[in-house]
Image (cartoon, coloured by chain):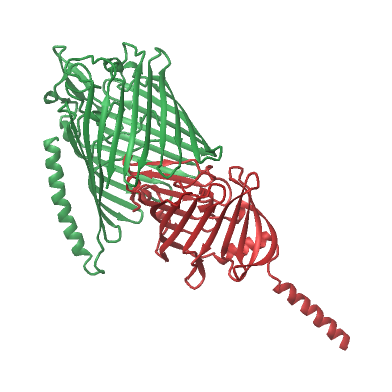
Chain colours: A green, B red
Amino acid sequence: MNGRLFLISGLLSILLLFSIEVLSQDSLAKPKPKLIKEVSGNFRGDYRYFPDKALYPDQQEQYFSMVFQPEIYLEWNKGKQILKYTGFARIDQYDNRSTHADVRELYFQFVLKKWELSFGAKNLYWGVTESNHLVDIINQGDALEGFGLNAKLGQPMIHFSWSPKWGTIDLIAMTYFREMRFPGKHGRLRPPFDIDYSNTTYESDMEEYNPDLAIRWSHALGPFDLGLSHFYGTSRLPIFTTSDGQTFSPHYELINQTGFDVQAATGPMLWKGEIIRRESKRKLILALVVGGEFTFSNVLRKGIDIGIIAEYNYDDRGLESINALDDDFFFGMRFAFNDRQSTDMIGGLIVDRNNGTLRYFAKASRRIGNSWKFSLEASRLDNINDQEFLYLIRNDSFVQISLAKFF
Amino acid sequence: MKTTTKITSVIALGIMAVAFVPARTGLEIAIAAEKSDNGWGNSTNKLTMTLTNRNGQKTTRQMHGYSMEVDGDGDKSITVFDTPVDVKGTASMTFTHKVGDDDQWLYLPAISRVKRISSSNKSGPFMGSEFAFEDLSSSEVEKFTYKYILDEQLNGVLCHKIERFPLSKSSGYKRNIVWFNKENYRVEKIEFYDRKDALLKTLTYSEYRQFLSKYWRAGVMKMVNHQNGKETLLVFSEIKFNVGLTDDDFTQNALKRAR
């Protein structure tokens, strides 16, 4: 774990305890506030198998790892004060970089009718589309948890949210930047070169302490969900620089990013779109994703819902974009069995319109008994064009079996 | 003179008779039922759902809910899942509308994401139960057409028996038969007929309690599926009214915080 983050979390906790003290004194006049305390979480074992020969030395064919995700939730004063902690830790059989822990969330929240004020590390998600998350920018992706960056690192912030009649306004000041970390030399799904995190550079003179700022308006207006956001601060995605061609150092630029996301529900159809304009000193980029999902519900009266998803991705970074969704179509299919074991499946493929690069994925999960969950995941890379970033991980198709115990 | 008086009284009696004749058309009964429940404001409850399969094996789910009456439109509600533990904290929010599709969102705590869900899915099962989504959403008068059948005794209670036909094409039913208690308009029983007009399910309401000396709420709802032999029992507890919920408690932020 990042030492400085740990220190900040610690200081924050002390601050929180102090504020609880103050606040509870404040409410002494009222009836004694009722404290609600919930502890929950899960343990999970993952087994991952890579059928293709490793490209780089020290990489393995199969990996076992264990994941622990605890959650502690405290609420008092009729829900007006909340303290929430969500932790994450993975122990990997071979790769000591992939063995990592993170504070996904640790925040104190004060709630009053139309507004919320939070201090601490939070996970905020913005956006609507399935294949790409362009507008989502607050949290750094946890690249140790997968190339799709769906897992996010906790972001320290002060977050004010106000919900008048005409939507919700979020104001966020981010106090500390979290670097993206990639699997180490024993891990798969990584670039071939060594990454020297001790030489990370920033455009901002304040480096990782640059105060990043964001504002967002969002509104649910009948069948529409709209969001308009602006972010100013350090880009979440690194650029790699090298002097010897062997060791690469991450560099983080300052960016201004404006994003717009929209969703409309018309009967069984959900229309979705996200567009961003990102400007740095180096360049201006535009990217968008548009598409939709059609749901056939209760198919053949068997209670099964089948969703068909289609999206188009464009990014004028072209081959420079890290997720390589520069001119790609996504087609997916989702099955929800709506049975007592909550069986779900999703599968899809992403195809590059220009060079034919193909990515397939499938995921399925099913509850066993009352508190266990079994899941399967597969990812396949095919016909990867040697100009794409994905070319570096072209042999890292995998299948994964997981079993989780919830408490 | 005498005759005139007689005639007048007959007319008067006639008018009184008309005035005291209970609502006769199905629509009038449905409107009267809705009216009798107007003004309940807002409430919270806990809910235990027990699923029983053909072999008698039982599975239990727990959840709790918040709901609020909206002037001139359908209700707003939030349902939070407590068990099974892997879906704990998952919450759904529904804005029911008298006309058109409802608005529905789902909060998935594992990915901190609120997703809008297509609400045209009415006939699908709720959480693997024998209740379809449409059986649990508030039955606004405007969502059906009606036909009065007759008044009859049901377990010793005099009821209006009416037929109602869903207007939505995505409904799983051709028709329902509903027994409204004649005295207080609470629903005692519903029979659901599938699209082929075969009897699919029977829902019975029991353990009614009155709140704020006006509003009746069933403590138990039992759904029996005649076609697959499965049953679902809903047991409501800790029903509270006037809990101070407002529009501010039914926003996406509130949905994320819902516990």
**Residue A129 visible in the shown view:** no
Outermost residue, front side: B55
Q: Going 23% across and 14% down the picture, which residue do you hit?
A: A55
Image coordinates of residue A374 in percent, x first then y, are: 33, 37
**Left or right side of B95 for B248:** left
Q: Quadrant of residue A317?
A: top left
Q: In which quarter of the image is residue A195?
A: top left
Q: Going 66% across and 67% down the picture, which residue do you hit?
A: B152
Q: Going 30% across and 40% down the picture, which residue do you hit?
A: A124
**Residue B40 visible in the shown view:** yes
Residue nearest the observer in this picture, B226 or A92: B226
The image shows residue A59, relative to residue B14, as above or below, that is above
Image coordinates of residue B119 in percent, x first then y, are: 51, 43
Image coordinates of residue A352 in percent, x first then y, are: 40, 17
Q: Quadrant of residue A34?
A: bottom left
Q: Going 49% across and 53% down the picture, which residue do you hit?
A: B231
The image shows residue A192, relative to residue A1, as above or below, that is above
Image coordinates of residue B39 in percent, x first then y, are: 51, 65
The tally of labels here is 0
Quadrant for the N terminus of chain B, please.
Answer: bottom right
Residue nearest the observer in this picture, A293 or A300: A300
